Image: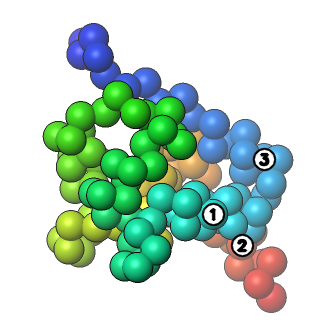
Amino acid sequence: MAAQNAIVFEDFFPAMVEKLGAEGFMKELSNGFRLLMDGDKGMITFESLKRNLALLGLQDMTDEELVCMLREGDLNGDGALDEMEFCTLMFRLSPALMKSSRKLLVEALINEM
């Protein structure tokens, strides 16, 4: 049973991929990263995430929830998210994208050739 105050994540990513293609979707993820990152550090930090919560419609998140979100995506343990960690986290949050990630990778590689 989900907590009453749990954040509901509606998975719009598959529709975005369908509309934009793999390359366009990855550009949008990069744009999202740049929007949330600390300009001086080039990473998403606790402070930069907290400062930009309203852009995501998540202004009611607690500091503890923010820390948990960062921890979830922080693969190298430095306390912040670099662009690859952010993109990886976004894919992990989207069950439909996880299922189709191989297809997206192939499409992106073909577009690079």
Question: Where does label 3 land, which residue?
Answer: 18
Is residue 92 in sight in this rendering?
A: no
Q: Which mark is residue 106?
A: none
Q: What residue appears at the point 67 percent right and 59 percent down from the top-left corner?
A: 28
Quadrant for the N terminus, please: top left
Amino acid carrying label 2: it is Ala
Callout 3: SS: helix
Marks 3 and 2, how far apart at CA: 13 Å
Q: What residue appears at the point 82 percent right and 47 percent down from the top-left corner?
A: 19
Give left or right: position of 79 versus 89. Answer: left
For residue 48, which quarter of the picture?
bottom left
Q: Earlier in the sequence, mark 3 or mark 1?
A: 3
Crowdedness of circle 1 by 10 Å Cα count: few (<14), some, many (20+)? few
Indicate the position of residue 111 as horizontal and vertical percent values. Answer: 80, 78
Q: Nearer the viewer, mark 1 or mark 2?
A: 1
Indicate the position of residue 22 as horizontal and vertical percent values. Answer: 72, 62
- Whether pointer 3 and pointer 1 mark residues with C-beta atoms closer than 8 Å, the reply is no
Callout 2: SS: helix
Q: Which mark is residue 31?
A: 1
Indicate the position of residue 69 as horizontal and vertical percent values. Answer: 29, 48
Quadrant for the C terminus, please: bottom right
Question: Where does label 2 land, which residue?
Answer: 108
